[in-house]
C-alpha cells in the first residue's frame, strides 16, 4: 500500500517492511519502482488446441515493491484454468536487470529456476498423510506372532517325539515293575510343563535311561523359552 503525503509517497505493507528490515540489516538503500496494481491477462490454453483464450483474472494481491532501475509496470495475478503460466512484468523487469529484486510469492518450477534466483521457496498446497491410530486388540494370536510358522511346527514335532518316546519307556514292563504305572496324560504334562519352565515332579528322571532324554528336552525348553520371551517383547512393542 502507498499513501501520498504532499509530494512524497509513503509505502507500507509486509513486502515493503521486509525490504526495510533487510536494508537496515545489510546496510544498503533502495527505492521503489512505480507499478500498476490491476490488469487483465491473455494466455494460450493448451486444452483449446492452441487457440488464444482471453481470461479475466483477479489479482492475488497488490504488486510488491521493486528495487532498482527507472520504471516498470509489474503485477502479480492468480490465473484459473490456465495450462501454463505467463511471466508477469515484475519478473520481466528483474530478468532485464531494470529491477534487481522483487519481493514476490512465486511457486518454484524448473523452468523458472533457469531464469530467476529464489531466496525462499513457498508451497501453496502442502501435502500431508493421515493414518488410522493403531489400536492393540487383545487376541490369542498375540502369543503366536513372536515365532514363525516353521518354528512352531518344529516345537510341536519335537514335543510329539519326546512324548511318544517317554510314553513307550514308561509303558514298558520293566518300568512298571520298578516304578509303577505312569499315565500318558502325566507324561504329557511333565513334557509340556518343562517346556513352559515348570519344574519336574521327578517321575520321569528316576531311571538313568531317561536322564539324557529329559536333560536334552529341558535344554531345548530353556533355549526356546528365552527366544520366545525376547520375540514376544519385540512383537508387543511393534504391533502388527
Image (cartoon, rainbow, N blue to C red):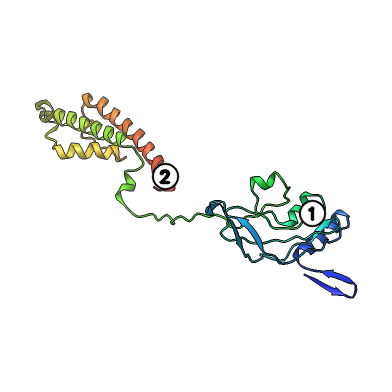
Q: Residue at x 78, y 52 (%)?
A: 94
Q: Position of residue 215 (x, y in %)?
A: 29, 28
Q: Which is nearer the eye, 42 or 240? A: 42
Q: Position of residue 228 (x, y in %)?
A: 36, 39
- The residue to which callout 1 is attached is 101
Left or right? Give the position of 132 relative to 185.
Answer: right
Q: Residue at x 64, y 48 (%)?
A: 109
* Location of residue 179 by image quarter: top left
Q: Quadrant of the N terminus?
A: bottom right
Give the crowd class for mark 2: few <14, some 14-19, many >=20 residues within 10 Å: few
- The residue to which callout 2 is attached is 233
Q: Give the vertical position of 6 relative to 24 (above or below).
A: below
Give the crowd class for mark 1: few <14, some 14-19, many >=20 residues within 10 Å: some
Q: Does the rendering let one see residue 77?
A: yes
Secondary element type, mark 1 = strand
**Spatial CA span between label 1 and label 2:** 59 Å
Q: Which is nearer the eye, 100 or 120? A: 100
Amino acid at each position: 500500500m502507498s499513501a501520498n503525503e504532499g509530494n512524497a509517497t509513503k509505502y507500507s505493507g509486509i513486502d515493503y517492511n521486509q525490504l526495510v528490515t533487510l536494508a537496515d540489516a545489510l546496510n544498503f538503500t533502495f527505492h521503489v519502482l512505480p507499478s500498476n496494481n490491476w490488469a487483465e491477462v491473455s494466455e494460450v490454453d493448451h486444452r483449446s488446441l492452441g487457440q488464444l483464450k482471453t481470461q479475466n483474472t483477479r489479482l492475488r494481491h497488490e504488486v510488491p515493491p521493486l528495487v532498482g532501475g527507472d520504471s516498470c509496470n509489474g503485477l502479480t495475478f492468480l490465473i484459473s484454468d490456465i495450462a501454463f503460466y505467463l511471466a508477469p512484468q515484475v519478473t520481466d523487469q528483474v530478468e532485464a536487470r531494470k529491477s534487481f529484486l522483487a519481493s514476490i510469492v512465486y511457486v518454484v518450477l524448473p523452468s523458472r529456476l533457469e531464469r530467476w534466483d529464489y531466496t525462499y521457496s513457498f508451497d501453496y498446497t502442502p501435502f500431508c498423510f493421515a493414518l488410522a491410530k493403531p489400536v492393540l486388540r487383545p487376541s490369542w494370536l498375540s502369543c503366536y506372532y513372536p515365532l514363525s510358522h516353521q518354528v512352531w511346527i518344529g516345537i510341536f514335532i519335537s514335543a510329539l517325539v519326546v512324548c511318544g518316546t517317554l510314553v513307550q519307556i514308561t509303558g514298558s514292563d520293566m518300568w512298571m515293575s520298578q516304578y509303577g504305572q505312569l499315565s500318558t496324560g502325566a507324561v504329557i504334562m511333565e513334557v509340556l510343563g518343562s517346556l513352559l519352565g515348570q519344574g519336574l515332579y521327578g517321575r520321569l528322571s528316576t531311571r538313568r535311561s531317561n536322564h539324557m532324554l529329559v536333560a536334552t528336552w529341558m535344554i531345548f525348553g530353556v533355549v526356546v523359552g528365552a527366544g520366545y520371551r525376547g520375540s514376544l517383547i519385540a512383537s508387543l512393542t511393534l504391533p502388527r
